[in-house]
Image: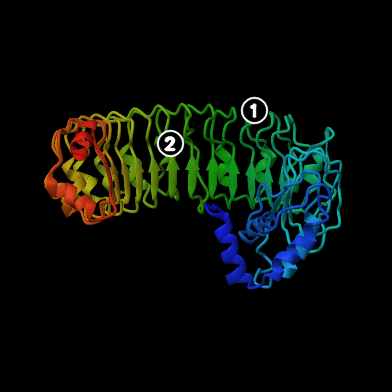
Amino acid sequence: MIMQNIHTMIEDFLVNRLGSEDFQNKIYKIYRNLDDKVPRKVSDMIHHLFVICDQHVDELLYNKNIDHTKYLDKIKAMVDDIDKDIIKTFNICNNNAIQNVNTSTRSVDLIDIDKEVISVVKQKYNIGLMQTTSLSKYRNEIVVKNKSIVALSIFGQDLRTIPNIIFELKHLKKLYFCWNKLVDIGDTWGNLQHLQEIDLSCNYIHNYPASLFSCKNLRELNLNNNNITNIATHIRCFKNLESLFLDSNEIKEIDESVSFPGGFKRLSLQCNQITNINNLIQEINPIVDLNVSMNKIKEISPKIKHLKDISSLFLQNNQISELPETFGKLRNLKNLNLSDNNLKQLPKCFFKLKGLRSLGLSQNKFDSFPLVLSGLINLERLDLSNNKINTIPVEITELKKLTSLYLSFNKIEYVPVFLINLPKLSLLDLTANKIKRIPDEIKDHVKTKIFRYYLTSAFDNDHKK
């Protein structure tokens, strides 16, 4: 919760939500024995409660030597309008002297104690409580006594292998093992039949073990920032897989036998060394969100038309010089980014992309405003910055839903009056052009609505006059 005026919000909370001055005294009684040397201020107590009521407890501990978990139930019991599921997360990271953590509280689902010196974790779990836990390496070993946990996070511990004890957690649904030094991720994944989400990002993994594909209920697999060189051809074995993240790996080619399960939606391959995506595009393709930005793609195959369900397509930072006419078949496309390529023009079919909401074309080689864009009647955001455009055509007024227009770093000399006919335009960026002045009609229009504009220093001087 972002609070610019904490005291005002505290007062409002007490008066309007809790309605009792006595509440401050009750809070104080709970906390007065936490620190015998330095009594706490009431405002700190209430701030503590504020964060709890905001569903996420972060930077909560003012005294880093105290286990506050045992006080959560008392606080929650005092506030009638806090639902039983409101308090979700309790963060006690970066403490120095806590030796025991009370995990029996009924008011919290997740306790995050990563990177601590805690030596003992009490295992007084209640049914339905403490379904998630985040445990780090304590004194050079992994301690997981509660075999019924459903989510586990072990990150930043420099581990080179996944401890065998992890594969004994048969109820596990989510496993986060990022920022370690994994090379071998084991071959006993078949024991974890309930796994739905795996995050193994930021490790040194080279390949997928065969047993990983026995996790039939897996929905999301994150292997970003590893040393993987291909998309496993058996990826379709994950019948329930919806999302696969392989950013920042060493993938150069995509095998023609790669295919995805029917419910697959999201594939991210940004920042690899891929030269073409032809083998990703099959006649029956379920992908909804595809990110292949920051690769070495030079052309887009006419087969792109088979991505009939695609909603978001990210192709920025490649070497694409033209688009096929079949691109207009992507009727469900809402977000398209083609920035930082070598495009000089757009195909005539582009106007058929009526569903587009956001279009990125910055850092290409357009020497004029692509008139075909006037057909994108639902477009809300258009970025044509860093090109060589010298005029803004009247056809742009067809974009009645446009809210943001980025034309910085072009060669525009004149701001046309007809821009006031874009009823929803609220941001116009014309930074670093050749504009000497702006029409009075535009200035007056700016004054009558919430509008942000960025022009050259020449206009700024004119505006000050």
Query: Horizontal placement of 124 versus 210: left or right?
Result: right
Residue 128, visible in the rendered structure: no
Total numbered labels: 2
Question: Quick one: SS at disc 2?
Answer: loop
Q: Which residue is mark 1?
A: 204
- Residue 396 is left or right of residue 132, and the answer is left
Image location of residue 356, percent across then percent down: 31, 51
In which image quadrant can residue 26 be found?
bottom right
For disc 2, the marked residue is 292
**Residue 12 image-quadrant placement:** bottom right
Q: Callout 2: 10 Å neighbours few (<14), some, many (20+)?
A: many
Q: Residue at x 77, y 63 (%)?
A: 73
User: Which x, y percent locates residue 136?
Assistant: 76, 39
Q: Residue at x 73, y 41 (%)?
A: 114
- Mark 1 residue type: Tyr
Q: Amino acid at mark 2?
A: Val
Q: Quadrant of the N terminus?
A: bottom right
- Asked if residue 166 lies left or right of residue 287, the reply is right
Q: Residue at x 69, y 34 (%)?
A: 156
